[in-house]
Amino acid sequence: MSAVVELEHFIGYGGKHLNTVRYHPTEAETLIYSAASAIIIENVNDPHKQEFLRGHDNDVSSIDLSLNGKLLASGQLGSPFRKGAVAPVVVWDFDNRSRYIDFNGLAHSVLCVRFSPDGRFLVATGANQMIFVWDVSTGEVVYNRRTESPCFLGVWGPILDLSGRYPSYQLCTTYDSQVLYHVMKFDMRSMCYTLDSDAMQFPPSGLQRKHICGMINGDFLITGTSAGDLCVFNIKTKVFRTALPVCNNGVTSMAQHGEMLFVAGGDGRIKALRGFDIQWDVLAENVLESGVVALTPSADGAELIAGSRNGKMWRLLSSDLTGTLQSASHTGEVTDLTFGQRSDVVCTVSDAGEVFLLDLSDYMPITSATSKSPVRSAVFADGEILAAYDDGYIRAWSSEKGVSKQLWQMNCHRQGVTCVRASPHFVVTGGGDCAVRFWHRKSREMLSSFQNHRKPVADLILDEVSPHVVHSASEDKLVVTYDLKQNKALVQHTSMGGNITSISQRKDHDNEVVSCAQDGKLLFWDVDYPDPTGCIEGPPDVLVRLRCCEVSPNGRYIAAGSDDARMYIYDLVSCQCIQECEGHSGGVTQVRWSPDQKQLISAGKDGCVIVWNFFEL
């Protein structure tokens, strides 16, 4: 018998970067957005239809599509693995979902990528104060220079001369204190394109603005600034016309369809404007619960998608800007996952203080709760979500749909709660103070406290056979078994290898405890023997630092997540690794099997939650 794992769904739009959500310009239902280092192509009406583009080694910070929808460009933050923090720009063949060409020269972060109206040229700017214009068809550099300050925005205008073989192009770029207008013409003498540049004239009193987003509309350049203004420039006269205050916390995104201009701000405000030159009227307005970082209109103009800073995407009607939630994701490192009795509901928590209860049929939150303190662990049982926080508290949240209600809380550990598990009769917690404590499920009185560990408790599991037995593990290399009935620690195992990061339990073989460690080994522990009774080694040629593990519900397989962003599936009969699964762009912090064993869920330091389908052949 063999088994195979396939990637089913990616939840990971974190809202960290501006304008990394784009509707496809010709396919009305296709949405493209970044999730950590991956690019997701999704059907807005069916979240199960997802495709993935993978070619970056750090967060994707900027994306753009050509007007015909054939090409997709993406830029990233500086690579952590390449010298000089280089930030490559990748152009993708969208129809074939394949890599077309790579461009280098930018570093630290790609701030902006934009295709010319005909898709032939690509302008890109970087945090290393470089600006490049590339010919996409040949891969040649048409123009590049180092600027005095980073260029946050480059926008193309309509093509000026379409009659000849070499048309002329308009391009506007913005900097801290100036806005430049360029005309890119073909020079017959040198047989290459050259750029002529002019600075826009500002009022004599000056206008210090950082222009974040913008577009060219007819003869006018319209930009959004970090001060919350909408600035209008006349391209023909190269003169500043007006600055209109539209929102607070900066104008972060701008979209256009027909005569309508949609403007979004860092205060969550979205406005539909119509006007010309210095006269603009507000036709509709809406305020979302968090600052907007992306705004994109559908191909038919009937809808907009807004991405917000709290990791959510909203679907808005263009006519009146009424919105419905499209998706939700974590904004910080996902620290734990937990299933209850059902296989279609999973609870995910993050170090940004977020608790989500997700419905896996549509990947939407049934309920969510947020707090200021990071969450380290959670358990979902009896209609309650018990979450363990860095401030030392366990908080219980209601799992009712749409109700973010705290049921109770209790102070458990001085240095934060690192792990929590619950049975019908007791709650057991592990803390940063190295203690393992048992609490009465109903009265919440402390029943016992044990101080066997010398480092913070890394993991806890309830015994599969004896309901009053609990096992704990810590990076002090100890695996300890406690008996609540006898009120004592039964046995203490010591690993001679790497620091232990997580434990699970076998369904066969005397229900041995399985531990994973930073040396890449899976060790099996029996209560009756002091030394490990078995071992599964990691790959022979590389050191794999395992971070989490769980035995499958039928006991045949074990899934383990590692710091190298991979998930490994082992067959416990043959003791062989049967599959390596790549999806995350940061270390895998937790893996969980669904109770029916049809799916695996993994969580990562990249803030992403990945749903995998599991098949036995």
Image (spheres, helix red, strand yellow):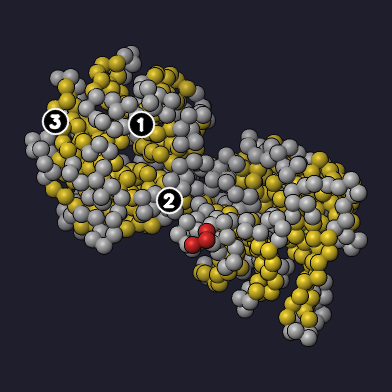
Q: Are marks 2 and 3 in contact (CB under 8 Å)?
A: no
Residue toward you, 400 or 150: 150
Amino acid carrying mark 2 in the image: Gly
Q: Which mark is residue 586?
A: 2
Q: Residue 69 in the image: state x and y as whole percent.
A: 64, 66
* Amino acid, disc 1: Thr
Q: Earlier in the sequence, mark 2 or mark 3?
A: 3
Determine whether the residue tagged by mark 1 lies in a helix, strand or loop: strand
Residue found at x 33% / y 43%: 592
Q: Position of residue 248 (x, y in %)?
A: 73, 37
Q: Of helix, strand and loop, which one carries label 2?
A: loop
Mark 3 residue crowding within 10 angstroms, few (<14) / some (14–19) / many (20+): some
Name the quarter where the C terminus is drawn: bottom left
Residue closest to the far bottom: 189
Q: Residue at x 26, y 62 (%)?
A: 541
Q: Name the residue under label 1.
A: 418
Residue 143 horizontal/vertical position (percent): 70, 71
Q: Which residue is labeled 3 in the image?
A: 491
Q: Residue at x 25, y 36 (%)?
A: 476
